[in-house]
Image (cartoon, rainbow, N blue to C red):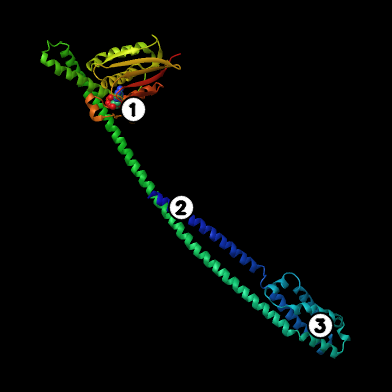
Amino acid sequence: MKLSFDFFRGLIIGALTVGLITAALSLAHMRTQILSIGNGSATGPVWYVTGVERELQEFEFALAYYELDPTTANNVTLRFDILWSMVASISQGDVAAKLEDFNVDYALLEQMPELLKKHDAAIMDIGALTREERMDILLEFRALNDEVHQVGMKALQASSAETLTWRETLLSVSNNNAVVGIILIVIVTILILMFQFDRVAARRQLREKDALLVAAEAASVAKSQFISVINHELRTPLTSIKGAISLMSAGALGEVPKTFERPINIAERNCRQLSSLISDLLDAEKFSSGAMEYKFEPINLPQFLTEQIETHASFADSYGVTLSIQSPVPELIVNGDAHRLGQVMSNLLSNAVKFSKSGDHVTVSLEEQNGRAVVSVTDTGRGIPEAARDKVFERFQQVDSSNERERGGTGLGLSIVKAIVEAHGGHVDFDSVVGEGTTFKFDLSLVK
Ligand code: ADP
């Protein structure tokens, strides 16, 4: 939906661009047309040719009038000169070229200067001519009238035709512009609608986000309340139950009948599991909220790991598993939080024990590699399939959850291990072969 919407928007913007380019070209074309009308290139020749016709008649009239009033000799020579200058201007500039363009035969106009030259001297001294001589000249010029008129008419027709073509062109260009304008208005309207639609959608998303935020805040408050309930209402009574059971199993409350031993052991083990589940949940919450605090201090790893093995020996024993340590040196100091690193070892050791068979052995080894201490916990248990590599470090993830629940796991342990090791600037990983065993390794930088 989003893709086709974007495609449609692209199409509209493309159309808008094409429309604008077309409008610009069309306007440029119109401008050229208007400019060519403005400089008179179409009407100019008509003006000159009709000018020659008019001046020819003016000259003929002046010559005829001279017979009535011989004092008007000057007027005759003046009209003769004006006619000549008009004729001369025909062959100048682009008038002749335009007449050729119009396909108008103007040979006659080109011959006129010859005629004018021929009678120039006589007209300048008109009083010296006889009446017959003047009439001959008049008749000679009058014979041109019709032809000059024809040339003028043809130029006028061609000019009108050209003007008509311009009009039509201008009309079609302005029609095109009107159509392009309407199309542009439609496109712009669609674009505005689309942007409006976007705005509405963005506002709706914002409202939804706000609602989600409110829900998330409410969930966070509920989670905090839940954590607090776990902490106070569950942990406190559990501690006293654990204490009471311990007292019973230690015989502090009197001798325990043989038949009570097994249920008391089961209750003790379940209390331990419940207590570790509560600790894991509280820790996981602290990690995700970034509230976990560390107290770093120098730790002698061989000694620390030996203590961890001693602490977990009885747990391992309850699974029929033995623990041991391999350390090449008696002293290897790292900077760490002993309590949190204890949690790391506790998770790795209890996993190694839980997923081993009775009679198996779990080894903790310590090595120094490139200025770092590398701690490994190796078991010969069932192993982890390669496909579960990323999954096991995620929260609440187990390779086989139906089976694992029975062993008392929550799927939180390795995520806590990862978070603590990374907070120490280290890295945790494992090698495993299904059916043969697993080695978890993590490294810590040594104190120099
Ligand atoms: P859990 O509380 O279930 O042990 P973890 O996060 O500690 O949760 O471990 C996640 C899962 O990784 C376990 O449920 C188990 O499937 C697998 N796993 C962890 N350690 C081992 C191991 N040493 N051998 C085999 N499987 C293991």
Q: CA distance from mark 2 to mark 3?
A: 78 Å
Q: Viewed as shown, does residue 435 lie left or right of 107?
A: left
**Residue named by callout 3:** 76
First in sequence, mark 2 or 3: give its number: 2
Q: Is mark 1 within 8 Å of ligand 1?
A: yes
Most distant residue in the right direction: 128
Label 2: how many Cα within 10 Å (few below 14, some 14–19, many 20+): few
* Vertical placement of residue 109 versus 317, above or below: below
Mark 3 in CB contact with mark 1 (< 8 angstroms): no
Residue type beneath disc 2: Gly
Residue 410: image x %, image y %?
A: 26, 26
Q: Which residue is located at x 47 percent, y 61 percent?
A: 183
291 with respect to 187 (left or right): left
Q: CA distance from mark 2 to mark 1?
A: 45 Å
User: Which of labels 2 and 3 is toward the front?
Assistant: 2
Residue at mark 1? 393
In the rendered image, the vertical position of residue 373 relative to residue 87, given as above or below: above
Give the residue type at disc 1: Phe
Q: Residues within 10 Å of mark 1 (few under 14, many from 20)?
A: many
Say which element carries label 3.
helix
- Residue type highlighted by circle 3: Val
Which label lies toward us, 2 or 1?
1
Say which of marks 3 and 1 sits in front. 1
* Residue 286, picture quadrant: top left
Residue under the point 25% across and 30% down: 401
Disc 3: CA contacts within 10 A as few (<14), some (14-19) or many (>=20):
many
The quarter of the picture where residue 240 lies is: top left
Q: What residue is pinned by disc 2?
A: 10
Residue at the outermost top position: 330
Whichever of labels 3 and 1 marks the residue nearer the N terminus, that label is 3
Residue displayed at 49% across by 55% down: 14
Task: Give the percent coordinates (x, y) of residue 423.
Answer: 39, 23
